[in-house]
Image: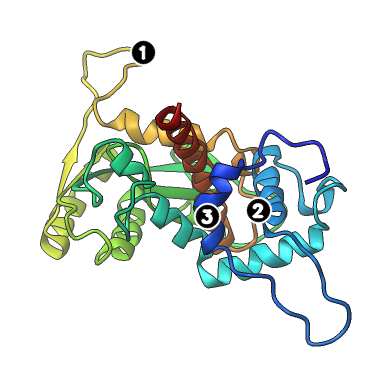
Amino acid sequence: MSRKPYPTDISDTEWDLIKSMIPAERKRKRGKKREIEMREVVNAIFYILRAGCSWRMMPHDLPAWQTVYSYFQRWQRKGIWQKIHSVLRCLRRATPTQLRQLEGRDVEPSAGIIDSQTVKTTEKGGIDGYDAGKKINGRKRHILVDTMGLLLMVVVHAASIQDRDGAKLVLDKIQYSFPKLHLIWADAGYAGKLVDWVRYFFGCAIEIVKRSDNTSGFKVLPRRWVVERTLAWLGRYRRLSKDYEYHLQTSETMIYAAMTHLMLRRLARNHSRSTA
């Protein structure tokens, strides 16, 4: 790499963790072979996420925006970001590099925390709705995290969908992915029939963490702070400050990519400590 590095560039250690999961460059049927370094494509995507700029405003010392965008779409269709994210999260394999094992936890989570975040959309278009409680027109990011705050599932949907119904969309997607999951913490917005629905269809308990009526001002709630911290982590990525994407799937992929970048940083720090 001949250019000056950006703060979002991945290190050699981080690249070693994911390079085997990045598809090789597609061969051209005719003409001059295009030489694209896949690591630079990944760097460019992380730059877009953290800087919050549009694809067309990508710096000239990174690969052409058309090339990066093409790879991003291709990897999205193939579920590459979800695969990388899952491996780093210790979902599929048991290797020493995986995050939950470095923290001394089981590979598969037994408990999680669910919450949603409403964000505004832009003139880009696509599906949106009005969140009457937050008074925001846009979309909701519904996330389920484990007790470390690592993402288990994200579903993006119209902001007009209530939290209870949005939670069903999330749980439908994880039904067979986390067989050991038996407890989910949630706020009062998920109370009611959802608790019985989850117990009946998933054999999983939802425990509502309520704010005390005697409490005034800000107070950290047990368990709830974990998912709120995850949303704060994602808030570091300016591309996620609003929902700039047309397709819901693209919005979800952006979140998986951001969490992948966060976990790579953490894994690299742990690697540095272990080799020091």
Amino acid beneath label 2: Val
Question: Around disc 2, counting alpha carbons within 10 Å, would you say few (fewer than 14), some (14 to 19), or many (20 or more)?
Answer: many
Left or right of residue 234, residue 37 in this image? right
Q: Which residue is mark 1?
A: 217
The answer to which quarter of the image holds residue 150 is: top left
Q: Nearer the viewer, residue 221 or 253?
A: 253
For the residues labelled 1 and 3, the Cα–Cα distance comes to 43 Å
Q: Secondary structure at mark 3?
A: helix
Residue located at (65% from left, 45% from top): 49
Quarter of the C terminus within the rendering: top left
Asked whether residue 15 is in view, the answer is: yes
Residue 151 picture location, percent across and down:
39, 47
Does label 2 or label 3 sit earlier along the sequence?
3
Residue 126 picture location, percent across and down:
63, 62
For the residues labelled 2 and 1, the Cα–Cα distance comes to 42 Å
Q: Secondary structure at mark 1?
A: loop
Does label 2 or label 1 sit earlier along the sequence?
2
Position of residue 268 relative to residue 143, above or below, is above
Q: Which residue is mark 2?
A: 42
Q: Nearer the viewer, mark 2 or mark 3?
A: 3
Q: Farthest residue to the bottom: give it.
A: 29
The reply to whether the C-beta atoms of the residues labelled 1 and 3 are less than 8 Å apart is no
Question: Around disc 3, counting alpha carbons within 10 Å, would you say few (fewer than 14), some (14 to 19), or many (20 or more)?
Answer: some
Residue located at (50% from left, 42% from top): 264
Left or right of residue 253, residue 45 in this image? right
